[in-house]
Amino acid sequence: MTTERQSIHGQWSSRWTFILAATGAAVGLGNIWKFPYLTGEHGGSAFVLVYILCVAALGIPMMMAEVMLGRRGRETPVNTMRHLAKEIHTSPHWQLVGWAGTVAGVLILSYYSVIGGWTLAYILYSGVGTFSGASGEAVSNLFGKFVGNPIGLLAWHTAFMIITMFVVARGVKSGLEKAVQWLMPALFVLLLVLVGYAMTTGFFLKGLAFLFTPDFSRLSGSGMLAAMGQAFFSLSLGMGTIMIYGSYLPKGISIAQTSVSIAVVDTLVALMAGIAIFPIVFANGLEPGAGPSLIFETIPVAFGNMAGGTLFGTLFFVLLLIAAWTSSISLIEPAVTLLIEKYGMTRLHAAFWSGLITWALGLGTVFSFNIWSESTLFGLNFFELLDYLTSNLMLPLGGIFIAVFAGWLMTKETSKSELSMKGEVGYKIWQILIRYVAPVAVLIVLCNAIGLL
Ligand code: TRP
């Protein structure tokens, strides 16, 4: 088997396109919606600290490993794992890692799309000036009414799934890549505007203290697991998204540098969202642990009380929608390429069927916020269960297997030449992190959270 294989699904035109696409996949609802609400639920600074440690020590080496496997395999994650396992004469069962990841992507997208639908609805609400001058309480009430209506949520979820599958069906066209090039920086600028507003609330320092004053007493096992799960989620690791994006990467591009850039940008966006949101939470007497509703209650208040807020607020939700959109595409790409490679479907059919299944699963999340909100298992409703299962269990476990495969089973010659790092030291650090630190840390956090340690 040669190492010069090409993906049948295409190739990025340059390193820059890959960075844009992978950053587009990484930066999404995870940064702006999920990171602040998880931070609030888990008490602030301790969560943030564990999160940053996980990104640096686990996230970056794992991202490098996933890109490397993807670029060498150049196929859908299932086939990539199967072929790479064959190449090093080990069990074909390694393809199960690809299967689990592909399923995880579909499960995540099923609820991601529901929240993406909320973003669509909030573009409309802001656009017609609903939030203009609104109080925290009014915005909260509106949110409660909004999620209480299953038909409305279903319609928005359907609309989000349609726009996602539309892009997936066409293949990731340069139009989208070009758009991301402008829209991501625009999102960043609007986050800065929000941070500027947060500074005027009089609670800016309180917000910063909440995020950054170390308070180890609040470091619970479940909080650590949530922080680790969030690091995987936010960087899109552990399920094959980065592997499939790596499979479209031309040879000769530095995997290490690229991975570090993506991780840094992703983390900065999440931290900025936190820095913007918590002062607004405190200034308006809102609850930091409010859960998934957090940004849908704070951001409208901020823009509603700002000059030009209707315009900027609408723009903010438009940009959030685009961030969510570029991530949702990446969640389903492993499933779509699997249907094409394994079952010979056309891209259009593959997009249709995978989209339909994801959409149907999404009904569970739609109902979790209204008619099924009281149906729980282990105290979690359908949406919470799905989120726990995927972010906290499937992604970290997928990560362990990928780390073991890349660190222990692949030969040193292969990983070294694939990563082609300049210095010996960089490679050594990667090797230690991927062989020892990543698998051991993930196991400890998992065992600790389920009470085994
Ligand atoms: N990282 C994205 C976000 O933060 C979501 C996402 C895209 C994802 N692809 C993924 C999460 C793969 C886990 C795995 O919104």
Image: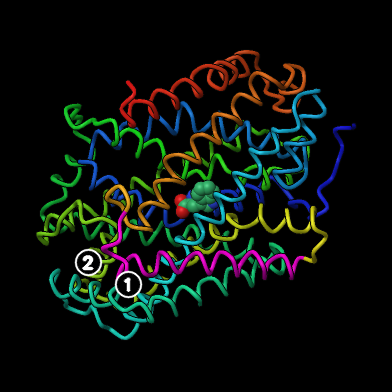
Q: Residue at x 73, y 53 (%)?
A: 338
Is residue 84 positioned above or below 377 on the image?
above
Q: Is residue 399 magenta?
A: no
Q: Gap in Å between the C-alphas at discs 2 and 1? A: 8 Å
Residue 27 visible in rendering: no
Percent position of residue 121, x then y: 38, 77
Looking at the picture, how far across and down is residue 180, in whole percent?
A: 57, 61
Magenta part mainly helix, strand or loop? Answer: helix
* Corner quadrant of residue 231: top left
Residue at x 52%, y 32% (from the top left corner): 60
Report helix, strand or loop for mark 2. Answer: helix
Q: Amino acid at mark 1?
A: Gly
Pointer 1: what residue? 313
Q: Position of residue 84 (x, y in %)?
A: 77, 32
Please state if 316 lies on the left or on the right of 16 as rendered.
left
Can you say which quadrant of the picture contains the C terminus? top left
User: In the rendered image of this protein, does residue 440 appear above or below residue 51?
Assistant: above
Q: Nearer the viewer, residue 349 or 19?
A: 349
Res 122 quadrant in image: bottom left
Q: Find the magenta span and give its range.
A: 347-376
Which residue is label 2 attached to? 302
